[in-house]
Image (cartoon, rainbow, N blue to C red):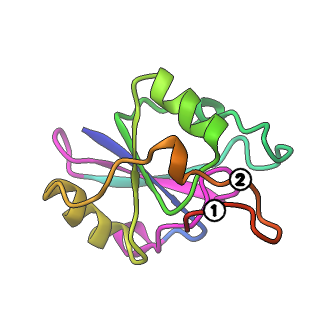
Amino acid sequence: MKIAFPTMEDNGLNSQVYGHFGSAAAFVVVDTEDTGQARQIENADRDHLHGQCQPLAALGGESVQAVVVGGIGGGALRKLNHAGITVYRAVEGSVAENLTLIQRNQLPEFTPQHTCGGHRGNGGCAH
């Protein structure tokens, strides 16, 4: 399975999982089955307007089966789910720590009730 983890820096498996999908600088993509390798891809949709995230464009055409992130907007969640990509809620920590948790089935799946509604005042973010 290929899993994408939004990050702000390229430290491979030691990168900290970023708190919001759309504004992450990049994604660390881990191939858990074929190669076990981790590599970084740039967020190709980082400079979008709030609510206009194109998550498949952000992933630069990379085919992944899951995303692990601290927070995500409802539109991005729907688009990823519609493409067959499962989105999990990350815990604060590194890609490696969250990878271990997802492999143990210990990360909850994101639901629309836990998505970001904005970032001002009581915007409804779960992260």
Q: Residues within 10 Å of mark 2 (few under 14, many from 20)?
A: some
Residue 126: image x %, image y %? 55, 64
Vertical placement of residue 39 versus 119, above or below:
above
Residue 88: image x %, image y %? 38, 51
107 sits left or right of 83 in the view: left
Q: Residue visible at 46% across and 29% down?
A: 81
The boundaries of the magenta stretch are 11-36
Q: Earlier in the sequence, mark 1 or mark 2?
A: 2
- Tell me if label 1 and label 2 are in contact, CB under 8 Å: yes
Q: Amino acid at mark 2?
A: Gly
Q: Residue visible at 39% across and 35% down?
A: 64
11 sits left or right of 74 in the view: left
In the foreground, 116 or 22 = 116
104 sits left or right of 4 in the view: left
Q: Amino acid at mark 1?
A: Cys
Q: Residue visible at 43% across and 76% down?
A: 92
113 sits left or right of 1 in the view: right
Element type where label 2 sits in the image: loop
Residue 125: mark in rendering: 1
Quarter of the image with the N terminus in it = top left
Tell me the residue that label 2 is attached to: 117
Residue 15: mark in rendering: none
